[in-house]
Amino acid sequence: MKKQHPFRTMLGLTQQEIAMLLGVSRSQWAMHELGQRDLPLEAQQLLAEMLTALQPVVTQRKAPVPSLKQLKETQRRLNRVQERLVHFERQLAKTQEQERCQENRRRLAEYFSSHKKHQTHRATGVANLLLLQAPKPDETVAQLAHQQHRLEILGLEEKILKATLKQLERQL
């Protein structure tokens, strides 16, 4: 089944050419077009930036009359992006909760280690256990940054698809 990404159609590029622009392999791009694989984060960001840069140019030109198939495909892609947005929002909330728990563990461990009446062998062991079970702060911060960045990219993609869908509906 051949599907062509609207961006590739708009510029008349081959899969190889768009893959080279984004710094991915042709097979990665092909799987992305089919909805079987996500692009790497850097490639998604670059694609979003390129789409944003071309958006005003595209809207100024008189576009050909879209088909109902194009409308349905755009709606399908929008639904998929919205599903991924919900998924990443949940992941972000989970990571933020982990970060809060991690901070509470650090505070509790600090409490046990700083108060003389709690500096028993058992209390020190509990404090160490709390610190050992907590994820490393750098990992959590990096994970949060990655998830927030991913949400931003999906948000941009959602805006572009909504604008495209609105434009297609007006042209039909």
Image: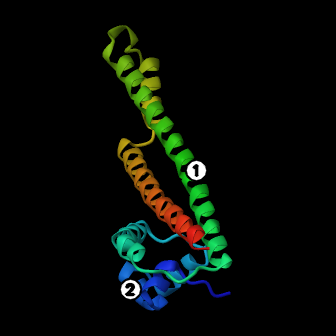
Q: Which residue is disc 2 drawn over? A: 20
- Between residues 112 and 82, which one lies in front from this camera angle? 82
- Between residues 117 and 75, which one lies in front from this camera angle? 75
SS type, badge 1: helix
Q: CA distance from mark 2 to mark 1?
A: 30 Å
Image quadrant assignment for residue 42: bottom left
15 sits to left or right of 36: left
* Residue positioned 43% across, 68% down in the render: 44
Q: Which residue is disc 1 drawn over? A: 86
Residue 49's label in the rendered image is none
Q: Earlier in the sequence, mark 2 or mark 1?
A: 2
Q: What is the x, y in percent for residue 10?
A: 46, 83
Q: Residue type at mark 1: give it.
A: Val
141 sits to left or right of 6: left
SS type, badge 2: helix
The C terminus lies in which quarter of the figure?
A: bottom right
Q: What is the x, y in percent for residue 109?
A: 40, 24
Q: What is the x, y in percent for residue 164?
A: 51, 68
Q: Residue type at mark 2: give it.
A: Met
